[in-house]
Image (cartoon, rainbow, N blue to C red):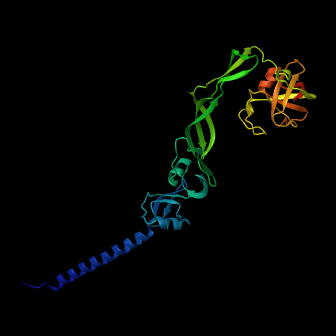
Amino acid sequence: MSLPDWHTRKRVIRCACRAVLLGLLFVVASWGYRNIVVSQVTLVIDGQAQHVRTKARTVGQLLEERGLYARAQDVLQPSSQDRLNNGTVVELRRAFPLFVSVDGQTHRAYTVAAKTADFLTALGVTLAPLDRVEPALQDLLEPGTKVIVTRVSTSSVLEKADVPFATEKKNDPQLPLGQRRELVQGRPGLLGRTFAVTYVNGREESRQLVEEETLRQPLNRVVAIGTGATLPAVTAGARGGQVVQTMQGLASWYGAQFHGRRTSFGDVFDKNALTAAHRSFPHNTRLRVTYLKTGRSVEVRVNDYGPHIGGRIIDLSLAAAEAIGLRRAGIGMVRIEVLR
């Protein structure tokens, strides 16, 4: 084997030098290209697009080059670390402040949403079918807008009310003329009304009648009205009494509202008994009372203190007033005779 001659070695060295030189030139050219290349990108700021040429290699460098920055609430696509390529679209949506009132709380929030619906979705607010929103869900938002969510709900409410009973009157010839006796005690009926009630933020706003139903029929009161002979007047002569004092003045009467209650003297008041209330005569004093308009008289026993209205001298029971024809008039001029 023969060794290469000098000329051959010289050619090999020359080729190696060329290769090294070409490699260095390639490295220098690559470094220079990387530092002088300019990318054409689209920059969209809050919906406004512009085409820019940049030497920046990343999205973050591009924003810094343009004097922009992305806050925590802003939306940046792609992210600041992503590399830029020719034709890359960079979008920056800057959040703006507004106020939101929901469930009794009002606070400030930041959003990049264009419409109310998108803002509430991003905030995590769930709307019921009847809830009201202002501005409307599809309205555009502006900085400082106040978004109000009003909670609306409905429910069915049943309310009960009494139904008044009527009074039926029946003539009874077995009772003296004008006297009354209760045969059936009345009882009110019961009416049910169902309402659809609308509540706004937990408070009633309106109601609408949906259904009305009679839950219980009323029971009418039945009263017997005497049509028989008039009660004879109880006179002093009939009882062997003697008139010891006479006076004259206005008489009135009282009845059902005090029936069964204790009188000032401790007796149980009976509206159907022949009794009277007087302010000066002792308990059990016998009096003959004559209604001057009819001329009819009745003998009564004092078992109560009264009357309590000025200008009147005696209060008769219902039965005593019926006996002399005073019940319908209410008050009338009478003569009182004190019997012994």
* Depicted 47 relative to depicted 58: above or below: above
The answer to which image quadrant residue 248 occupies is top right
Image quarter hosting the C terminus: top right
Determine if residue 72 is in view. Answer: yes
Please provide percent x and percent y for residue 87: 44, 57
Q: Residue at x 58, y 58 (%)?
A: 109
Q: In this view of the protein, which residue sits in the foreground, 50 or 279?
A: 279
Q: Is residue 220 left or right of residue 42?
A: right
Q: Position of residue 253 (x, y in %)?
A: 81, 28
> Does the rendering let one see residue 115?
no
* Residue pictured at 49% horizontal, 62% vertical: 53
**Up-down relation of residue 317 to residue 77 (above or below):** above
Seen from the viewer's position, the closer of residues 220 and 337 is 337
Q: Quadrant of residue 183?
A: top right
Image mark count: 0
Q: Position of residue 90 (x, y in %)?
A: 48, 58
Front-lying residue, 104 or 180: 180
Q: Position of residue 137 (x, y in %)?
A: 56, 45
**Most distant residue in the left direction:** 1
Relative to 244, 170 lies left or right: left
At x 88%, y 18%, the residue is 295
Q: Looking at the image, which residue sits at the far front?
A: 240
**Residue at 78% from the left image edge and 16% from the top image edge:** 230
Front-lying residue, 140 or 39: 140
Q: Where, quadrant-wise, is the N terminus in this rendering?
A: bottom left
